[in-house]
Image: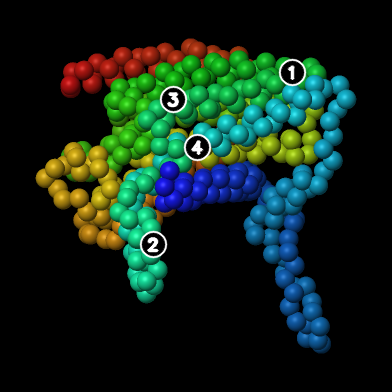
Amino acid sequence: MDAPFVVVAILNLAFVLGFLINMGGMLTWVERKQGAVMANRIGANRAYIPIPLPAKGGGIRWYKRFTMIGLFHALTDGLKMLAKEDYTPPFVDKFVYNIAPWFAVVPALVTFAVIPFGGPFQPGIMMSDVLGVVGLNSAADVIHGFFGDTTYQLQLANLNVGLLFIFAAGSTGIFATALAGWASNNKFSTMGALRGASQMISYEVFMGMSILGLLVVYGTVDMNLIAQMQGDVHFGFIPSWGVVYQPVMFFVFLTALMAENKRVPFDMPEAESELVAGYFTEYSAMKMGLFMMAEFIEIAVISGIMVSLFLGAYHIPGVHAVTDSWYWAQHPELTAANTFWGAEVPHAVVIIGRVLSFLIKVVLFCWLQILTRWTLPKFRYDQVMRLGWKVLLPISLVNLVITAAVVLALN
């Protein structure tokens, strides 16, 4: 393992962890403020930093409360949770009780490892472009000499079975619900665990079925290759995005992922109005915080998966990098270059634009999920099961048959 590869891997890891952890924290604030706006309420606005200004007669006076639109309220809630007593009830199975929260947050973080957030890039050329603009030519030569012209991936783990890895890692989240409910030795927690296990296992079935149509179209489970294949266009203006090929499965897959995250309208495992807090009723302090943080991190992970499979991943229509090997192989009549809507640009411009494109799409999906949470009423448990087995599963099966027939007919 060479040194440049290690450096790129560390930078990718720092980006993924920093993005997910910060998004998990920011979404707690977005949840409150977006819900308040939709319900015509003020929302969280009490925590603030006072801004000192000079008084007329000398000295300092506190003039304005700097609230950052309620952001400090979310920060103080996090500090309060860290400072709370971590109480463990005497009647729980302590080992399982303590390990269950980690089964909630770790799979969410690990799942994002195979999601490409910028595509193939050449860090040596990219950094040379950036440093050359600011006049640091000698530093640019050093960086280029270190990385060379080697192509790396803006992806933490470039696996050829990336989509299967997402299903395998994401499915382990059920252990958090089941273990927490069982170890708590509480009837509300146990009922929440049973609901969560049946709901998550049920929706796993047609979540897999709904994505099979997309796999028939692209013919691979490699997330990096699926992302690259969405960089092409049809008839000069229709992007090869998954939502174009599978518009119905876009909504089915998103519904299944939201049900996996156990949020309204699919919050039967928690069901505050019925089960206190469901499977984590007996948790307090930062252990409860891990469960709550995992839900918001999963919002970002779900958004990343949806963007990568259905919304063109990091691609901007009409923007191509010289490292897009799949695209140039499909278009041998073109010369590989870094192009932005027909104009040739530095490699850094394309890569930075792609990362920003990915982040904007993820934020859009996060907004959509929170919008759904504050729009739809909570379903009953039988309605959740009926929606899955009697509506979404048949739709997924019919879609798979139609997709296979169309692909076969079109060769």
- 271 or 14, nearer to the observer: 14
Question: Which residue is at 36% across, 46% downward?
Answer: 152
Alpha carbon distance from label 2 to label 4: 28 Å
Query: Of circles 3 and 1, which is in front?
Result: 3
Position of 369 compared to 51: left or right? left
Q: Label 4 belongs to which residue?
A: 112
For the residue pair 229 and 385, the one nearer the viewer reads as 229
Q: Earlier in the sequence, mark 2 or mark 3?
A: 2
Q: Residues within 10 Å of mark 2 (few under 14, many from 20)?
A: some
Q: Position of residue 181 (x, y in %)?
A: 73, 21
Q: Measure the C-alpha gap from mark 2 to mark 3.
A: 36 Å
Give the residue pinned by disc 1.
182
Earlier sequence position, callout 4 versus callout 1: 4
Q: Are marks 3 and 4 in contact (CB under 8 Å)?
A: no
**Eye-nearest disc, 2 or 1:** 2
| Mark 4 vs mark 1, CA separation in Å | 28 Å
Q: Which residue is mark 2?
A: 143
Question: What is the secondary structure assignment of the residue under circle 1?
Answer: helix
Disc 3: CA contacts within 10 A as few (<14), some (14-19) or many (>=20):
some
**Closer to us: 113 or 371:** 113
Identify the residue at horizontal 73%, vertical 60% (top origin): 48
In the figure, 244 relative to 96: above or below? Answer: below
Q: Which of the two labelled residues, at mark 2 and mark 1, occupies the earlier sequence position? A: 2
Do callouts 3 and 1 mark residues in contact (Cβ within 8 Å)?
no
Q: Position of residue 205 (x, y in %)?
A: 48, 16
Q: Return the residue at label 3.
A: 164
- Which quarter of the picture shows residue 56? bottom right
Where residue 92 sits, quadrant-wise, is top right
Q: Is residue 31 visible?
A: yes
The N terminus: image quadrant: top left
| Circle 2 or circle 4, nearest the eye | 2
Tell me the SS state at disc 2. helix
